[in-house]
Amino acid sequence: MGATICHYLIGSESNEGICPICNKICPIKGKEKVNLTDKEKQLISESWNSFKEGGNENALEVLIICIKKSASYKRDLGIIKEEGELKSDSRVKSHADSVMQFVNTLVESINNQEKIQNTLTQISNYHQQTQIPISSLIIYKDTMIDFMLEKKMTAKEGSKAWHHFLDKLLDSLKKVAKETQTSESRQPSTSQISASSKSNIK
Ligand code: HEM
C-alpha cells in the first residue's frame, strides 16, 4: 500500500509549512518559491551541463578549494590528510560525489517545487547529526560559482542566475532545518534523532 498523503495544508490558505494534522513539514506549502525567469533557467542548465562534462572531478576540485579556504571544512568533514593528499581522501571524494548528485537533482528539478523541497529536506537530514553552519554552505555556493566563471562555463549573467537560484535554496534549507526542529520538539519519538544532535543550520 502506498503512503497516505495528508492534504490538509495543501487545501488551506495557511502558509505555515508544518501541518497541524500530521505534524510533518508540508511538501508544498509555506516554502520559498524558486521563481526564476526562463533565461535564468537556461543559463543555469547550460553551465551545469558544462560542469557535469568533467564528471565528478569538478565537484572534487570545488570541495578541495573550500577545504583550503576554510578550516571548519576539514574539521566538519573529519579530514585528517594534508593539502597535497586531499584528492585521494575517500571522505572528500565521497562527499564531492554526494554534492554533485544532489546539486544535479536540484538543477534538474528547477521546475518542480515539490521535488526541490524534498531534496532540501534530504540534504538537511543528512547534515542533522553534524554541525554544518550555513556559512559553510555559502562558501560552497560562492566557490562553485567562481569556479564556473573562472573555467568559462558561465559568464556574469549566468553567475547572477546561479546566485539567485542557490540563495533561494539556502533560504529554503534554513526554513526546512528550523521546521524539522520545531516538528520534532512537538512530537518527539524514540526513532527521532536526539535533541542534542539537531541541525545547526541557522
Ligand atoms: C551543496 C552543498 C552540499 C550538499 C548538496 C551536501 C550533501 C550531502 C549528502 C547527500 C550527504 C550524505 C552522503 C554523504 O555522507 O556523503 C552529506 C553528508 C555530509 N555532509 Fe554535506 N553537502 C553539502 C555541503 C556540505 C558542507 C559545506 C559540509 C561541511 C563543511 C558538509 C558536511 C557533511 C558531513 C560531515 C556529512 C556526513 C554526515 C554524517 O555522516 O552524518 N556538507 N552531505
Image (spheres, rainbow, N blue to C red):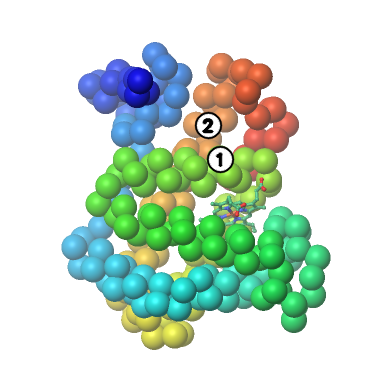
Q: Earlier in the sequence, mark 1 or mark 2?
A: 1
The 10 Å Cα crowd at callout 2, few under 14, some 14 to 19, many 20 or more, is many
The residue indicated by pointer 1 is 125
- Tell me what residue is drawn at x 69 percent, y 65 percent: 90
Report whether residue 160 is seen.
Answer: no
- Tell me what residue is drawn at x 67 percent, y 75 percent: 87
Position of 87 with respect to 27 (left or right) is right
Query: Compared to 35, does 13 lie above or below?
Result: above
- Tell me what residue is drawn at x 25 percent, y 52 percent: 111
Depth-wise, is mark 1 or mark 2 nearer the camera? 1
Query: Compared to 93, does 174 lie above or below?
Result: above
The disc label shown at residue 180, or none: 2
Q: Quadrant of residue 23?
A: top left
Residue 149 picture location, percent across and down: 42, 81
* Total count of labels: 2
The disc label shown at residue 193, or none: none
